[in-house]
Amino acid sequence: MKIGRFRIDFRRLGVLVGIAILLFLIMDFNNRMEELTRLQKEAALVRVQATAVVITQQALQTQVAYATSPAAVEAWAREQNRMVQEGDVVVIPLPEPGATIPPTPLPTPILNGLTKWDVWLDLLLGE
């Protein structure tokens, strides 16, 4: 077929359209492969996080099981609440007569890190 000075060959036109469609399909395939790679990385990250959560859950369940056991209650009563059972002998250590009790050391005050310039500005401007 001939349009003006140009001659159209349907065979070549079909090949060019086929190549164009093939290029679009290749670009779409490439985009899908990139999306697949991203999703696989995200799935691996979620699996790691899920494993960490399951391990944390197991540790917490173990702690709850111990905390609700009679052994934990007895340990708490004896160590922190200073309770005794029948038949126990309570021993309270006392200092020797005439011994001086060492004074409780006072903690040193912690400076808040202000420089002399900051102190002056605070005094003058009242901030």
Image: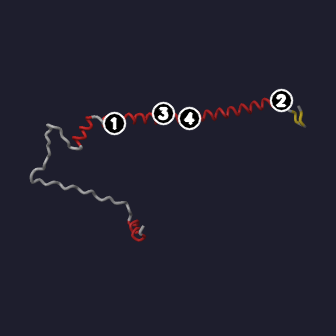
Is the residue 94 above or below the residue 71 in the image? below
Task: Identify the residue at image location x=28%, y=58%.
Answer: 108
Please state which of the two labelled residues, at mark 1 or mark 3, is closer to the viewer: 1
**Number of on-image labels:** 4
Instruction: Find residue 4 and name its label.
Output: none
Please state which of the two labelled residues, at mark 2 or mark 3, is closer to the viewer: 3
* Badge 3: residue crowd in 10 Å (few <14, some 14–19, many ≥20): few
Task: Identify the residue at image location x=38%, y=62%.
Answer: 114
Task: Identify the residue at image location x=88%, y=36%.
Answer: 6
User: Where is mark 2, residue-wise?
Assistant: 10
User: Where is mark 1, residue-wise?
Assistant: 64
In which quarter of the view is residue 27 placed? top right
* Badge 4: residue crowd in 10 Å (few <14, some 14–19, many ≥20): few
User: Where is mark 4, residue-wise?
Assistant: 39
* Badge 1: residue crowd in 10 Å (few <14, some 14–19, many ≥20): few
Verify CB contact (< 8 Å) between mark 2 and mark 3.
no
Label located before the other in sequence (2 or 3) = 2
Please state which of the two labelled residues, at mark 2 or mark 4, is closer to the viewer: 4
Quadrant where the C terminus lies? bottom left
Label located before the other in sequence (2 or 4) = 2
* Badge 2: residue crowd in 10 Å (few <14, some 14–19, many ≥20): few
| Rendering coords of residue 24 (x, y %) | 70, 34
